[in-house]
Image: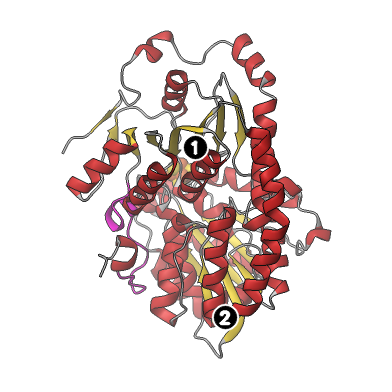
Amino acid sequence: MAAKTPFESFKINLENDTSPKREDSLGTIKAYSGKISKLAEDFKADKKLKWYDRKFEQASQCLLTQVVNRILSIRDSALIIHGPVGCAQASYGYREFYRNLPPQLQRPDFELHILSSNLTEQDIVFGGERKLRLAIESCVERYNPKSIVIATSCASGIMGDDIEGITDSIQPSIEARIVPIHCEGFRSEISQSAFDASAHAIVKYLVREPKKKQPDLVNIIAPFSVTWADRVELTRLFNKVGLRPRFIPDFATTGELAEISEAAVTAPTCASYGFYLQNALYEKYGVPYFREPAPLGIEYSEMWFRSIAKYTGREKEIEALIEEEKAFVLPKLEEFKKRFKGKESSIFVAAGQARAIFIPKFAAELGMNVAAVNTLELDPFVVDELQKVYEKVGDDFEVHVSDVQPFEQSHLMNKLKPDLYTGCPFMGLYKREGSHVRNHSFRSDFSVQSNQFAFRGLLNYAYIIQRALNNPSLNRTLHDRRPSPYKKWWYEQENIMAYAANDE
Ligand code: SF4
């Protein structure tokens, strides 16, 4: 029997206030640079990934913001950011993100309710309890929400506010469910630990015991990179086979989240965002899950839908759906392949881990060489997947792990000079000599091309790659006319991770 991955083997303890951090639970790392062949060889020998610390970091991500961007879309909920008002500033931007979604594309009515407990220097000395109680009171008075999410900050963590003590004492006197999430910015160097903290709190405080099973309900993990157009397309496909998708936590109501324990299965779209939620729902309520990759491209989408068929008894309908979709997509894909033929080009892929596995394979299918793969963080189980990519595409590509360090990416790009860079919008901006395209949209993008999931999403991927390769002039002009943000000295350094060290 195959050895269990850290995903499967660690147990979730919902008695705890929050989840463990990823450095400990999965052995995730945030810094690496080297060829895929070397990474795979070292991992085989050491059975773990080596931890590197950066002595200098250009930027990093805060756990609080990783929580807020999804949680605040719970429709009848209110969010309290328990910290100085500055910690809440990023949350207001999301109102703009979500407001752009057209209601005619099934966008539910929503009003985002966000409060800051506004901790000050004085509160840091005397504690934030009074302000937190006041914020909860104001929330109930102003919005009468069905749930109140409390997102902690560095400040509340440093002074050690007893969040659970406070919320336990208030809960019996109000109807709204209080959901404290521990996302202090300093808690983990892997900001994706915040995904686990919010999943822990959702299952612990919001999800209730199942009253009955709902065999046609499918939970779908929906991080920020699952766009509205992805949601519309997946909903279309699910409806065709008589299933109801429930995107989590994306615009669900408190009541809808409470009943995800009754679903037939929890389907992944991003293991990084969803594995903890899948495990917790399974351990606490027996909701099955599967780990196949995100429904990106034909092969992965087939696997994904067939797994859903297994848990929902829709085998016949889903086989028919797969045939129908392939009949639509395959001839068009062949047309794309012809257009790419004979064009020698290379690609640098900067993406979340699910796309970092899928895009290089797809690019190679289109005839491109894979120059590098960059991810924000690297989980040990992904090394095997990257090695499979290596075996399939044949290029010994660079692997770069950098939680938002554009100066390192810029150095690597300068060395490799790929024709196309495809990047996650969160991964930083810098000058590129070749063309570039974002590999997924922000959550609120509802344009047709922002659907990249399932069978037809592949055509959109091919389209945006083709368009970017054909139109490099804007990037070239910017590259030629704008000064470099980094000194020549930086590009002369041998190692792009000159500021990183392993002190073991
Ligand atoms: S929680 Fe900490 S890292 Fe995050 S915004 Fe507040 S102070 Fe900054």
* Residue density around tag 1, few if under 14, some if 14–19, many if 20 or more, within 10 Å: many
Find residue 350 and name its label.
1
Q: 144 or 348, which lies in front?
A: 348
Question: Going from the N terminus, do you reach mark 1 or mark 2 first?
Answer: 2
Please report contact status of discs 1 and 2: CB closer than 8 Å, yes or no: no
Identify the residue at horizontal 61%, vertical 58% (top origin): 72
Q: Position of residue 24 (x, y in %)?
A: 27, 55
Q: Residue furthest left?
A: 504
Q: Is residue 172 above or below residue 441?
A: below
**Foreground of the two, 500 or 124:** 500
| Quarter that holds the N terminus | bottom left
Outermost residue to the bottom: 212
**Quarter occupied by the C terminus:** top left
Quadrant of the image occupied by residue 286: bottom left
Q: Is residue 234 left or right of residue 79?
A: right
Amino acid type, residue under disc 1 in the picture: Ala
Q: Which mark is residue 312?
A: 2
Seen in the picture, residue 194 relative to 13 is either above or below; the reply is above
Q: Disc 2 residue type?
A: Thr
Residue depicted at x 30% and y 58%: 25
Reply above or below: 281 against 77. Answer: below
Above or below, 297 against 405 in this view is below
- Residue 121 seen: no
Q: Is the C-beta of the residue carrying label 1 under 8 Å from the nearest atom of ligand 1?
A: no
Tell me which residue sits at (63%, 69%) in the image.
140
- On whether residue 102 falls in the magenta region, the answer is no
Residue range highlighted in magenta: 11-28
Callout 2: SS: helix
| Image location (x, y in percent) of residue 395 | 41, 34
